[in-house]
């Protein structure tokens, strides 16, 4: 059985590694610091016993052959640097587990399309960096021409994992929620639930949703165009949470604004559309960081 390699051993990368291991696949982390195995404890919100996850680590330079299976779970701005030393071929299978869209465009061998992963599950750090708490929700995969042969085995061990026929719409719903909640909470340094309480933030959220729906309807006339209530439902369900973009700004890290709102702007430009609210928020986030 071939090894799955993991680029980006953050919260969501660790969750994917855990379920791949549960399904019987070997998983190795690719990173330059190979001094010791990666060790993390996963605690599950549903009461399952905690798991001590121990993953071997390998430098990309030590790969003796191109990986057949790769999970890309690093933050979108670091995709190029992370992939540069990895010798992929057109026969490799790549799972993209990142916020936003388009972050791997131009970075993969010709003809290689990544399998996209969208999840509403959450993994939060609790106390020490080695301790993560997992709250399971739904996870979807899609984007490939056919369902891969390993998917059925993985889906029996990854709760609520599916390969839906309407994958693109699910992916776009997640994209719009990120394009509204992430930058607004980052710019104003507030938790997600503040969007439900602040009239000005509600106005901006409605404007961002309206523009996104205009673009996505132009791309796909079957798009339902109901983004605002969906986004507010996400904000309500995660009211006490700090968005990843807010956390990045607080930590002085690069944000994923280019892969989220920037992606919408690039698709809009190709359609001859203008999204002024998204242009303003990208400009504001760029000046913020």
Image (tube, grey):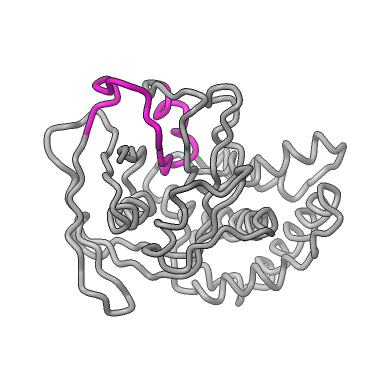
Residue 90's place in the image compared with 190, above or below, is above
Q: Which residue is drawn at 30% across and 48% down?
A: 25
Q: In which quarter of the image is residue 262?
A: top right
Q: In which quarter of the image is residue 154?
A: bottom left
User: Relative to the observer, which residue lies in front, 226 or 19?
Assistant: 19
Measuring from the top left, give residue 60's x and y in whole percent: 29, 25
Q: How many labels does the image show?
A: 0
Measuring from the top left, give residue 161's x and y in whole percent: 48, 63
Q: In which quarter of the image is residue 33?
A: top left
The residue lying furthest to the bottom in this view is: 47
Residue 25's place in the image compared with 106, above or below, is below
Measuring from the top left, give residue 242's x and y in whole percent: 44, 63
75 sits to left or right of 47: right
262 sits to left or right of 114: right
Q: Is residue 131 magenta?
A: no
The residue lying furthest to the left in this view is: 36
Q: Residue at x 40, y 63 (%)?
A: 158
Q: Which residue is drawn at 40% across and 21% down?
A: 87
Q: What span is colored magenta in the figure? A: 58-84
User: Relative to the observer, which residue lies in front, 191 or 2?
Assistant: 2
User: Relative to the observer, which residue lies in front, 289 or 80?
Assistant: 80
Measuring from the top left, give residue 97's x and y in whole percent: 47, 47
Q: For the N terminus, give its image quadrant.
A: top left
Q: Residue at x 20, y 46 (%)?
A: 55
Q: Is residue 68 magenta?
A: yes
């Amino acid at each position: 059985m071939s090894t799955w390699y993991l680029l980006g051993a953050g919260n969501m990368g660790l969750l994917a590694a855990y379920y791949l291991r549960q399904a019987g696949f070997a998983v190795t982390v690719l990173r330059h610091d190979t001094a010791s195995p990666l060790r993390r404890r996963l605690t599950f919100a549903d009461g399952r016993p905690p798991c001590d996850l121990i993953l071997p680590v390998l430098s990309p330079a030590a790969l003796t052959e191109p990986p057949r299976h790769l999970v890309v779970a690093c933050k979108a701005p670091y995709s190029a640097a992370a992939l540069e030393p990895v010798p992929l071929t057109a026969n490799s299978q790549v799972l993209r587990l990142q916020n936003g869209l388009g972050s791997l465009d131009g970075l993969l061998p010709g003809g290689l399309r990544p399998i996209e992963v969208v999840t509403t599950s959450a993994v939060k750090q609790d106390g020490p960096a080695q301790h993560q708490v997992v709250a399971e929700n739904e996870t979807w995969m899609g984007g490939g021409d056919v369902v891969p042969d390993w998917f059925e085995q993985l889906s029996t061990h990854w709760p609520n994992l599916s390969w839906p026929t309407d994958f693109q719409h699910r992916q776009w719903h997640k994209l719009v929620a990120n394009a509204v909640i992430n930058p607004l909470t980052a710019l104003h340094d507030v938790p997600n639930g503040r969007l439900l309480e602040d009239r000005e933030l509600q106005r901006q959220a409605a404007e961002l949703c309206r523009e996104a729906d205009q673009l996505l309807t132009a791309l796909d006339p079957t798009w339902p165009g109901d983004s605002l209530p969906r986004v507010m439902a996400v904000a309500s369900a995660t009211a006490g949470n700090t968005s990843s973009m807010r956390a990045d700004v607080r930590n002085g890290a690069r944000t994923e604004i280019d892969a989220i709102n920037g992606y919408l702007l690039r698709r809009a430009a190709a359609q001859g559309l203008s999204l002024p609210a998204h242009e303003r928020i990208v400009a504001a986030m760029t000046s913020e960081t």
